[in-house]
Image (spheres, rainbow, N blue to C red):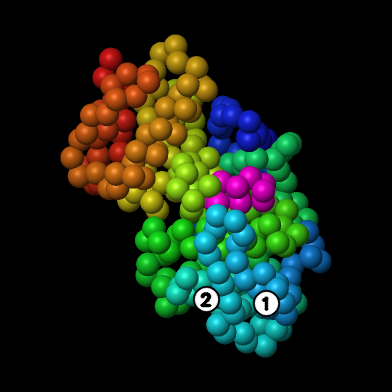
Amino acid sequence: MLAVNTTGPDILEPHSLRQEGRLGSAPRNGVSLFFPVGQRPSARAIAALLAAEPGTGSGGGVTARISHRPPDRDGWVELLANGLTFDLVGLAPALPAPETEIVQEHGFDGACSLEGLEAVELVPGGHIVGGARLLPVIRVLAGLAASLALKLPVAAVGWQSAQTVMEPRYFAQAIVNWLAGGAFPTLGLTALLRAEDGSIATRGLARFSGQEMQLEAAAGETPSDSLKLAIRVVDFLVRQGKLATPREIDSPRGRLLVEPSQTGRQVWVWRQN
């Protein structure tokens, strides 16, 4: 299993935890917080945490409070953050949240294993579930998840729509930087998957731009350079939004043609020279 460290880009290969029995349903739009067995928080613990530290800390800009708290045995609470509601489910003593398939990992010193971990899930609440793909909702969700990841004994963070898993501090730092105006955290909120021919395809980008992307391979280009270029293209697509017509863009690796597919669900990135 390949772990991607925080010191710089590396070759990204599809990584799956199938061998550990971690198969789940299709990607969802929440965040999975993985805890060692016996360390999932209860609703009471969440209430105490938010009462003591309602914000995310420096740069996050998200404050939260409990807006609905069923009996603790039900294992969930509704959180209100920046006027939006989110459900935190899988709390103790109820069963953990559903598992999800993981294809890529980031930020761990060694290979990540979810063996022996249980999930708590943060998802858009019923009132905003239809807007789960809207950027303002995603940003609040990410900021709230980053806060919880730092304040609770979280062992790993899963970004469901990309099917990625991240080391908690790596995730929180990337999110806080993004919310403060920094770069989009491509390596984590999307998965970049390399095919045998050297091309790179995204998973989870459509949540931000409405389309997934595939970057054409180039003869003689190192995997590191291909990855850096893919990150630049993803950043462009997130800022640009869904493309309806072809665009040409400049890059350190030459001019690129960015072309939407006929169905509009995919963007192909071709080399121009």
Q: Nearer the viewer, residue 165 or 182?
A: 182
What residue type is disc 1 on? Ala
Q: Is residue 30 visible?
A: no
Rendered image quadrant of residue 243: top left
Residue 202 appears at what percent x and percent y?
Answer: 43, 40
Q: Which residue is drawn at the image coordinates 28% and 15% (left, top)?
A: 273
- Left or right of residue 206: residue 176: right
Mark 1 or 2 closer to N-term?
Answer: 1
Q: Which residue is mark 2?
A: 80
Crowding at dot 1, Cα within 10 Å, few <14 / some 14-19 / many 20+, comes out as few
Q: Give the residues drawn in magenta, as a range.
A: 167-176
Residues packed near mark 2 inside 10 Å, few (<14), some (14 to 19) or many (20 plus): some
Does residue 175 sit above or below 254 in this rendering? Answer: below
Q: Nearer the viewer, residue 11 or 151?
A: 151
According to the image, label 1 marks what residue?
51
The x, y position of residue 1, in whole percent, is 67, 35
* Depicted 96 relative to depicted 273: above or below: below
Q: Residue at x 63, y 35 (%)?
A: 6
In the displayed structure, does residue 118 sit left or right of residue 250? Answer: right
Q: For the residue labelled by badge 1, is the local secondary structure a helix, a strand or a loop?
A: helix
- Residue 221: x, y in percent? 45, 15
How far from the left and from the top, in percent, is residue 178? 49, 48
Q: Is 178 placed left or right of 145 in the picture?
A: left
Mark 1, mark 2: which one is toward the viewer?
A: 1
